[in-house]
Image (cartoon, helix red, strand yellow):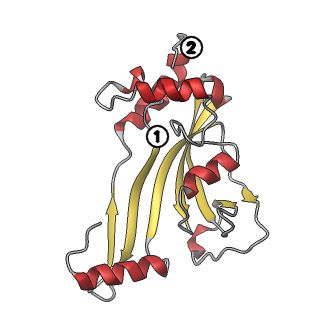
């Protein structure tokens, strides 16, 4: 997002502080994620969003600050990669709070790290170094399936900064390599892929 005027920028910053900007991300995670209430925190986190009833919750402190993420499962796919334990899950995520690396940390905490997250997933040191060396965003995804972190900003909505009563909403489709990963997750490792 880019503000066109100083006034709009000031109002946008205020809206972020007041949690009026709603963001949705899509991730592909290792394992078969289910809708649960994952509460690791004794501190309460504010959640101004009533529309999330029936969604999964991850509530855990990050840096001693309450942090809350809502999620909904989009699909589950079989996967023969050893870290997947039989499945990968496509999941939509709504961060209620905005801590650094919140989504990545929360998914790692519940045992479902994001595919390609070389910092928080359970790749060993040799794998991390091998995958970092192979990063080529122009190469076909199946050649380097761990070279891209599967965390994508899909949608943002917020009150228009200068037109009261209007809402601005911007959306993107998930990237094509997500479907490539879902397709490859079954056949690639059955063929003994070393990735």
What residue would you read off at disc 1?
A: 149
Seen as rendered, the residue at the extreme right is 42
Q: Position of residue 158 (x, y in %)?
A: 38, 75
Depth check: give the residue in front, 92 or 112: 112
Mark 1: few/some/many CA within 10 Å (<14, 14-19, 20+): some
Q: Residues within 10 Å of mark 2 (few under 14, many from 20)?
A: few
Provide residue 50's location: percent of width, then percent of height: 59, 75
- In the rendered image, which quarter is residue 7 located in? bottom left
Q: Relative to residue 145, is residue 62 depicted above or below?
A: below
Residue 57, compared with residue 124, is above or below; it is below
- In the image, taking residue 64 as reference, residue 71 lies left or right, namely left
Q: Where is residue 96 shown, x and y percent of the image?
A: 56, 68
Q: Earlier in the sequence, mark 2 or mark 1?
A: 1
Decide which of 140, 101 is in the foreground and name it: 101
Work out which quarter of the rendered image holds the N terminus and state it.
bottom left
Alpha-carbon distance for marks 2 and 1?
22 Å
Q: Within the image, what quadrant is residue 64 found in?
A: bottom right
Q: Residue at x 69, y 49 (%)?
A: 109
Q: What residue do we see at 48% from left, 31% from top? A: 182
Which one is in front in this view, the residue at disc 2 or the one at disc 1? 1
Which type of secondary structure does the marked residue at label 2 adopt?
helix
Identify the mark at residue 190; answer none if there is no mark: 2
| Residue 157 visible in the current orientation | yes
Q: Residue at x 70, y 43 (%)?
A: 111
Residue 160 visible, this orientation: no
Give the secondary structure at mark 1.
Answer: loop
């Amino acid at each position: 997002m880019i503000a066109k005027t100083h006034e709009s920028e000031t109002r946008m910053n205020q809206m972020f502080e007041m949690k009026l900007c709603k963001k949705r991300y899509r991730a592909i995670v290792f394992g078969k994620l289910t809708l649960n209430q994952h509460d690791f925190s004794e501190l309460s986190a504010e959640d101004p969003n009533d529309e999330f009833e029936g969604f999964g919750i991850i509530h855990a402190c990050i840096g001693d600050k309450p942090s809350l993420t809502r999620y909904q499962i989009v699909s589950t796919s079989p996967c023969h990669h050893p870290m997947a334990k039989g499945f990968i899950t496509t999941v939509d995520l709504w961060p209620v709070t905005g801590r650094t690396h919140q989504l990545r940390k929360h998914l790692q905490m519940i045992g479902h790290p994001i595919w390609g997250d070389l910092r928080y997933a359970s790749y060993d040191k040799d794998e991390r170094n091998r995958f970092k060396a192979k990063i080529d965003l122009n190469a076909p995804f199946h050649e380097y399936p761990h070279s891209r972190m599967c965390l994508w900003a899909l949608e943002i909505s917020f009150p228009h900064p200068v037109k009261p009563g209007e809402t601005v909403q911007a959306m993107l489709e998930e990237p094509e390599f997500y479907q490539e990963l879902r397709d490859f997750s079954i056949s690639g490792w059955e063929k003994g892929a070393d990735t």
